[in-house]
Amino acid sequence: MVSKAKTALIMVDVQNDFCLGGSLAVPDGDAIVPLANQLQPHFSLVIATQDWHPSDHMSFAINQPGHAVGDVIMVDNVEQVLWPAHCIQQTKGAEFHPLLETSRVDKIVYKGSDRMIDSYSAFFDNEHLRSTGLADYLQEHGVEEIYIMGLATDYCVKYSCLDAAKLKLKTHVIIDACRGIDLKPGDMDKAIAEMRAVGVEIVEMKDVLIH
Ligand code: VGL
Ligand code: ZN
């Protein structure tokens, strides 16, 4: 039997550390939690990602003596931005925001568990060496079209969208259900332009909720 194509919602990193009071709080990050809940019933599959780092992860400034948060260093010949320690496995900061509805979540994708390589994308690590299994999961479930929202627009949302487009998924980003870090002012606008350039469709809540 040919499975009918389905549409999936991918909620990126709606975790305590990226929200108010978290160690890597994204400005206004909490605002997207009710939007995530509102979106879920409109999709046949709901997927949530969790940034899931060991405490000795090389992306944490504290693990790179002599360096500070925001520095960009080379790790194994790959550029790496240094962050405050965040989303450490099994800690409160790595948990989903307490108001995020999780009963409809069909699959959780963990990423960033290898201490030597970061993984902004929900699909692959930053060097595309290892897959998280999400692409196979979508294929097995007949998903050809995805909607991405969450945190942060200019990192995990952007890289997830770029990989999805490469995988030939019809990719939409629900831009008013995302918030960005803007480490350098303009990063968020640049991220939107980069996503658009590879064919990602930029949509808003209202475009999704009418269906
Ligand atoms: C993220 C920085 C470091 C994100 C994750 O979820 O956008 N950003 N780790
Ligand atoms: Zn991270």
Image (spheres, helix red, strand yellow):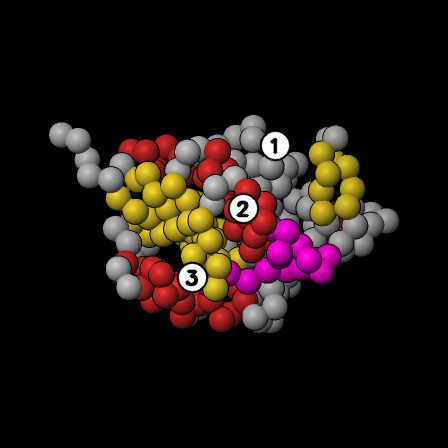
Query: Residue 55 placed where, x, y %?
Result: 63, 49
Question: Considering only order in the chain, which callout, 3 or 2, is on the residue closer to the N terminus?
Answer: 2
Query: Residue 185 placed where, x, y %?
Result: 71, 60
In three-dimensional space, the C-alpha distance between marks 2 and 3, rounded to whole angstroms, equals: 15 Å
What residue is pinned by disc 1?
A: 127
Seen in the image, is 135 located left or right of residue 140?
right
Seen in the image, is 202 located left or right of residue 207?
right
Name the quarter where the C terminus is drawn: bottom left
Label 3 neighbour load within 10 Å: few <14, some 14-19, many 20+: some
In this rendering, does residue 85 appear at all? no
Q: Pointer 2 and pointer 3: residues touching (CB < 8 Å)?
A: no
Question: Considering only order in the chain, which callout, 3 or 1, is on the residue closer to the N terminus?
Answer: 1
Label 2 neighbour load within 10 Å: few <14, some 14-19, many 20+: many
Helix, strand or loop at mark 3: loop
Camera-nearest residue between 159 and 48: 159
Count of labels in the image: 3
Q: Is residue 24 magenta?
A: no
Amino acid type of disc 3? Glu
In three-dimensional space, the C-alpha distance between marks 2 and 1, rounded to whole angstroms, equals: 18 Å
Residue for point 48% across, 64% down:
176
In three-dimensional space, the C-alpha distance between marks 1 and 3, rounded to whole angstroms, equals: 30 Å
What residue is pinned by disc 3?
A: 204
Report the mark closest to the observer, 2 or 1.
2
- Single out the residue that lies furthest toward the right: 66
* Numbered tag placed on residue 195 in the rendering: 2
Camera-nearest residue between 54 and 43: 43
Residue for point 19% across, 35% down:
3
Query: Residue 75 placed where, x, y %?
Result: 74, 36
Query: Residue 35 placed where, x, y %?
Result: 40, 67
* Numbered tag placed on residue 63 in the rendering: none
Q: What span is in magenta?
A: 177-191
Question: Considering only order in the chain, which callout, 1 or 2, is on the residue closer to the N terminus?
Answer: 1
